Amino acid sequence: MGTGSSLTAEEIIRLDQQHVWHPYAALPNAVPCVPVQSAMGCELYLTDGRTLIDGMSSWWACIHGYSHPYLVQAAKDQIDQMSHIMFGGLTHEPAIQLASTLSDIVPGEGETKLDRVFYCDSGSVAVEVAMKMALQYWYNKMHIDGIDQNGQSSKKSKFLTIRGGYHGDTFEAMSVCDPVNGMHHLFSNVLTQQLFCSRPTIKFNEPWDEADVDELKSMLESQSETIAAIILEPIVQGAGGMRFYSPHYLRRVRELCDEYDVLLICDEIATAFGRTGKMFAVDHASIVPDIMCIGKALSGGFTSFAATLTNQRIAEVFTRGPAGVLMHGPTFMGNPLACAVSLASLQLLQSYPLAQMVGDIQSQLETELEEARESPLVQDVRCLGGIGVIEMKEPMHMATVQPEIVAEGVWLRPFGKLLYTMPPLIIRPHELTKITRTMVKIATRGKAR
C-alpha cells in the first residue's frame, strides 16, 4: 500500500544506520530500525512487503489508528488555507475552536475549570510551560499579596513529585523524572534539585490505606513554604514502569495541596483522551488539578502537538502581577494545521462510545494476557483501560526480543522488564488477539537476559 519508494529496504536500513540518530539509541543503532512504507488503520506496511499489527499507537498517540480519513481530510482542508502563521499578535479559527472544544470536555467548573489553553510543541514542552506557569504564579501572587516589595523571587521555587515518574526529556522536565531509575541519571549533577517522595504502593483496585500518603504529607508539613507545586502522572505512571495506582491516592494529593497551599500539576500526556477508560485519568478520582498537560493523542498522533491547561484563578494572577506575561513562546505555537487536525480528532473521539470501546479492550487484554501469569519468568500481569502489561522478573534482551516480535507480525516496543501494549482505540478483536498471543509467547519462552 502507499506510494512507491526509490530505495529498497536494504538501502533504507544502510543509510539510516549511517546518518539517522534515533531516540534512546547510539549511532549506528544497536538494533537496525524497521522501515515502514505506509500505515492504515492498525497496520504498518513495511518496505519489504510485510505487515505488522501496531500495538503501540506510535508511542500512545495514534488512538484512531493511521490515515483516518476524517483526520486526513481535516489536514488537507487546512493546508489549502494555511499550514502555519505565527501566534504572536495573530490568531486563527482552528486554535479558537480547539480551545473551545477542549473547554467543553476538561474537568472542573467555574474558577476551577481548565479552560485557559496554552499551546505547545510537544509533551515535554507542555511540562516545561506548566512548571514556568506555577513559578510565575507564585511570584506574581507574592507581590499582589504584599509579601515582598523588594523584588525578591518567591520562596516557592521547588517541585515535589513521586518516584517512578517520567515527564519528558527537556531539562526541567528531566528534573522531576525518577532520579535513580529514570532515563536521565547521567544529568543528575546539572539538573535542578527537586523533592521526591515514595511512589504510591496501593494498586488501582486495592483498599485504601492512609499510610500511603504519610511521607508526602510529612514533606508538605515541613517544606510547603518552598514548594510551588506537586507534579505527577495521574493514576498511571507510564515510562517509569507502567504502574497503576489508587484513585484515592490522587484524591488525597488534591486535598493536601489545598491544605498546604501548593498547586497540583497533572501530567496527562500519556493518559488523556480515553486511554485509561475515562476521558482524563483524573476523572477516576473526580478531582481537578490546577494545571494539566496534554499531548500525544491530542492530535490523534497526526503531528507533534500539546497544550498546558489551567483555570481562571491561576490565569488572572498574571494580569495583576509584575510578571504579567507567561514567559514562553514557541515558534510553532498554535500551529493551524495541528489545531485543525486536533479539533477533528476530538470530534471523532466524541463520536465514539468511548467507555464501551475501552472497556472491551481492557476485558480482552485481561482475558488473553492472564496465561502469562503462570510463567516463572513473569513477575506480574496488569491491565487498565487500553493498557496491557506483562512485567518480567528480569530485563529483556532487546536485540533478541524486538526481531522476534516483528517476526510474529506485530509491532511492540518493550523496555527493561516491561512487555506492554497500548493499541489504537479502534483496534478490532482479532487484531488485539494477535498482539496478546505474541506477548504471551515472548514472555513465556525464556527470552530474559
Image: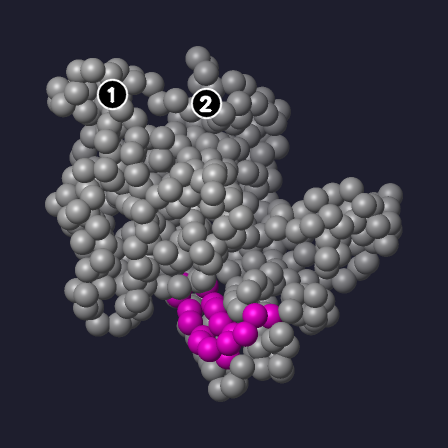
* SS category of the residue bearing label 2: loop
Q: Is residue 306 in view? A: no
Nearest the eye: 186 or 178: 186
Residue at 47 percent of width and 68 percent of height: 388
Alpha-carbon neighbours of circle 1 within 10 Å: few (<14), some, or many (≥20)? few
> Could you say where residue 237 lies in the image, as x and y percent from the top left?
40, 57
Quadrant containing the C terminus in the rendered view:
bottom right
Determine which residue is flagged by label 1. 152
> Could you say where residue 204 lies in the image, as x and y percent from the top left?
31, 67
* Amino acid under disc 1: Gln
The Cα atoms of the two marked residues, 1 and 2, are separated by 25 Å
* SS category of the residue bearing label 1: loop
Q: Main secondary structure of the magenta part?
A: strand
Q: Is residue 137 in view? A: yes
Residue at 61 percent of width and 55 percent of height: 41
Q: Does residue 81 sit above or below 112 in this rendering?
A: above
Q: Give yes or no for residue 223 being in the magenta stretch.
A: no
Q: Give yes or no for residue 387 being in the magenta stretch.
A: yes
Q: Looking at the image, tell me whether mark 1 or mark 2 is earlier in sequence order.
A: 1
Residue at 43 percent of width and 46 percent of height: 167
Nearest the eye: 15 or 60: 15
Which range of residues does the magenta coloring cover? 378-396
> Could you say where residue 90 lies in the image, as x and y percent from the top left?
46, 15
* Amino acid under disc 2: Gly
Nearest the eye: 20 or 178: 178
Residue 444 is left or right of residue 154, and the answer is right
Determine which residue is flagged by label 2. 329
Nearest the eye: 294 or 95: 294
Q: Farthest front residue?
A: 189
Q: Does residue 426 sit above or below 332 in this rendering?
A: below
